[in-house]
Amino acid sequence: MTPLLDVRDLRVTFQIRREGDLPWAKPRPLHAVAGVDFTLQPGETLGVVGESGCGKSTLARALIGLVPATGEAEWIDGKDLLAMSPRQMMKYRSDIQMVFQDPLASLNPRMTVGQIIAEPLTTHRPELGRSEVKDRVKAMMEKVGLLPNQINRYPHEFSGGQCQRIGIARALIVEPKLIICDEPVSALDVSIQAQVINLLIKLQKELGLALVFIAHDLSVVKHISDRVMVLYLGKVMEVASSTELYGNPQHPYTQALLSAVPVPDPTIETSKTIVPLAGDLPSPMSPPSGCVFRTRCPRAQARCASEVPEPEGSDHKIACHFPGPLTEAEIAHARRNEAA
């Protein structure tokens, strides 16, 4: 099957000036995304996880053209999205939509709900008449669980969960092939999170959508994703099916992330082994040599400082020189480093 999206060596670099730098000092590069590869099949959900600052949101913005990027992002028709000018990209805007993290901040407070949802239609389907646009907006509001008689209300009159439904309706109104969800439930209550996730799953099945789903909550990602990609400091650490990655994590970083996920069963929660992460995330302006995770890895060796590990494997890819479950001695070593 031809992938809907084939991304190769995606890189995003920002030129940063520090406070106090002299006017003639050269800006320093910040490597927010440092060579990411992945494919996305039609109708598939790819979960993207990692700590804050690992490049998840920057990756999403690069795919949709909100930040400049290098590399290749080949669409299903063979065109490279990253090589397009803004005018050329307009043709694909309706195929790739985005749902943002803050549901209220992403909506224009001066526009009614009907105007917000209709805006993509008036931009990408100018041939539609006013009555047809209104009918489509009402139908979409019903599809996402909103009442059509709320069409003339403003965003501040809705709850956070309802505002996110409005954002989803706005993304879906132009019938896209791919929706990029940038932490769409992180600002919502737990019960509302479940409703929004179930809505996305339902709509995906009905409409045949592909999703790139970015989140901090690994339990949410497990529920919605077909495959999961783990990022650290702008690089891919591990990619596998959701079942394989959660059941058999091979990278020490993935094991640490999964061990921190709370389990609702108190017996299991108190008996599980926690893999600590020593220290803080290094600065992307001066990443460690070799493996970027080595400064926090309990298994790091001399080779990790000199050689950059590349993701290896077919269905389960791991970017690690020494993959596999951590031993009790290595976990104890990580705990001593964390305490120090």
Image (cartoon, rainbow, N blue to C red):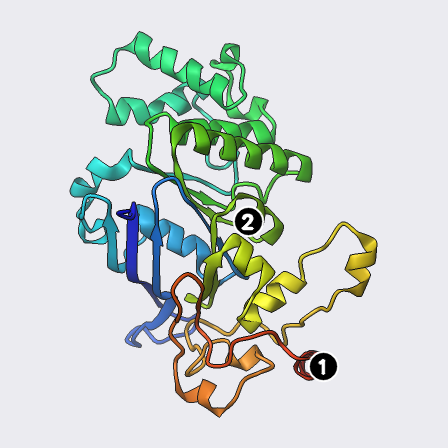
**The C terminus is located in which quarter?**
bottom right
* Marker disc for residue 157: none
| Residue 123 horizontal side relative to residue 204, left or right | left
Residue 102, given in percent of the width and then of the height, sits at 52, 40
Q: Residue at x 40, y 78 (%)?
A: 309
Q: Earlier in the sequence, mark 2 or mark 1?
A: 2
In the depicted structure, whether residue 104 falls above or below residue 81: above
User: Could you say which is closer to the camera, residue 207 or residue 34?
Assistant: 207
Residue 262 occupies quadrant: bottom right
Residue 254, given in percent of the width and then of the height, sits at 56, 66
Residue 320, given in percent of the width and then of the height, sits at 46, 76
Q: Which residue appears farthest toward the bottom when viewing the image?
A: 302
Residue annotated with mark 1? 332
Residue annotated with mark 2? 221
Amino acid carrying mark 1 in the image: Ala
Q: Secondary structure at mark 1?
A: helix
In the depicted structure, whether residue 87 falls above or below residue 246: above
In the depicted structure, whether residue 188 falls above or below residue 154: below
Q: Residue at x 33, y 14 (%)?
A: 133
| Residue 37 horizontal side relative to residue 274, left or right | left
